Amino acid sequence: MSKTPQAIRGTQDIFGADAEAFAHVVETFERVRRLYRFQRVEMPVFEKTPVFSRSLGETTDVVSKEMYSFEDRGGESLTLRPEFTAGLARAYLTNGWKQFAPLKVATHGPLFRYERPQKGRYRQFHQIDAEVIGAPEPTVDVELLVMADQLLKELGISDGVTLQLNTLGDGESREAWRAALIEYFRDHRAELSEDSQDRLERNPLRILDSKDPRDKPFTADAPRIDQFLSGEAQDFFGKVTEGLAAASVAFVRTPSLVRGLDYYRHTAFEFVTDRLGAQGTVLGGGRYDGLLEALGGPATPAVGWAAGIERLAMLVADAGLVPQSQLTCVLAVEDDAALTFAQKAITALRFQGIDAEMIASGSPRKRYDKAVKAGARVIVSFTCVEGVPTANLKAAEPSAESLAVDQVLQQIHP
RNA sequence: GCGAUUGUAGCUCAGUUGGUCAGAGCGCCGGUUUGUGGUACCGGAGGUCGUGGGUUCGAACCCCAUCAAUCGCCCCA
């Protein structure tokens, strides 16, 4: 006896209302990205492993435990993409897209991370993504932030979502800050949570957003990036905040918002909601001026963001904002002798751009009831009167839809 | 990798201290009723109670293991 294989942990079969919400998010993103003139790109779902491992650098945990890697038949290590950014950076370098700089691109699709599933977190998940490669100006950061803000507003989920904004400064500022943080936390080492004591060695910046209450008193008084910002970095951040003000995009300065990887510079941001449990980040991004160099390319400034489609879809669905598409016309074939006539009719309706569904199976007596339950604007029953197939249009009162359906039916004959 | 909770019909669930406990509603299929009609009634299909062990005269119920789901921790590019 063979058993049906189960779906892989952390994958989803998205269907029905969830699929509608998902599609609505993608469609809205596509509309907004056109407004901002971001070009659509399609990317491979897998790459050579170094594309991701080199971009991730020293965070060995992520590389070894969180990536879906495997060897192809030639023995080369490949990886299902865990993010869009590294693949886009690779494409920029290998295709000579420098000629198009500054390159504004947008994409969406599945990503893969070997994680324990929980609310809003899956092994195969989906993101929308927007990046600008080859532009060092803070105005570009602003454009991306305003675009993200508009997207959330167009989706109708901006209430309860706050933009958390921080700067990591340039390379030197960042390094000085990091050194100061290590020194500070080392002095309080014994009082930190076990996790944070561990983080002190691996990833000290992460102590700042620890969830452990034992760490809170120390994170509150920790050194802030502002004390270490160079004049240039201050100026950059100032222009970003001025741009946001000009676009009326509200934000909250969040000194604890950090990025673990060294290639991040300057702007870092997250749109966060309190409605998704522990996974509150709805859209996140920042400037990664150091990434293309890490991939072996020339120094190339870049900035971008990504957002989880599932999380956005949940917010949209919870707010009841998924557009419903009501069936326009349903045909109830109450006599099988009228079936071909009904088939002619439904074909004509659909060719006229009228969406239609036909009920022609099961007990003929119950087909009309089924048709009623389909919730269409217009019901057409098909019966035979003295042996002649006949269509009867039912509508409570004449409407644009019923008139249109009637007009098509007038032109159809058994 | 760790923790908590949960697994009974296609769906939502009930099932008492282990002793007709294999059930209900919805959905599906069929029949009757109604006949410009979202009605009502009758009937039917469908489950080795997640899986495998164990305790017991007897397990959906107790114990162990395992798988899966949900939520959280770790991690978060």
Image (spheres, rainbow, N blue to C red):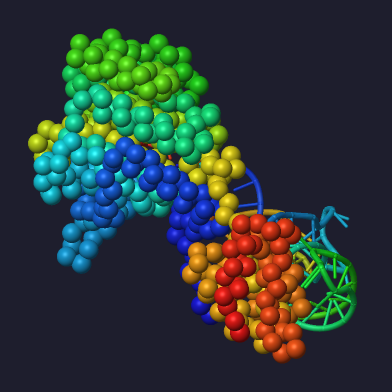
Answer left or right for A126 relative to B44: left
Q: Report the quarter where the C terminus of chain A lies.
A: bottom right
What residue do we see at 35% from left, 19% from top?
A246
Q: Is residue A250 left or right of residue B55?
A: left
Q: Is residue A352 left or right of residue A256?
A: right
Picture layout, residue A191 above or below residue A106: above
Name the residue rendered at 44%, 60% in the picture: A8
Image quadrant assignment for residue A403: bottom right
Residue B25 picture quarter: bottom right
> Residue A34, image x and y in percent?
33, 43
B47 to the left or right of A61: right
Which of B29 and B34 lies nearest the eye of the viewer?
A: B34
* Residue A194 rendering spot, x and y as whole percentages: 42, 27
Image height check: is A130 above or below A222? below
Residue name at image x 61 percent, y 59 percent:
A401
- Of A405 and A238, the residue lying toward us: A405
From what the image shows, is residue A23 above or below residue B77? Answer: below
Q: Tell me where residue A393 appears, x and y as whole percent.
A: 69, 69
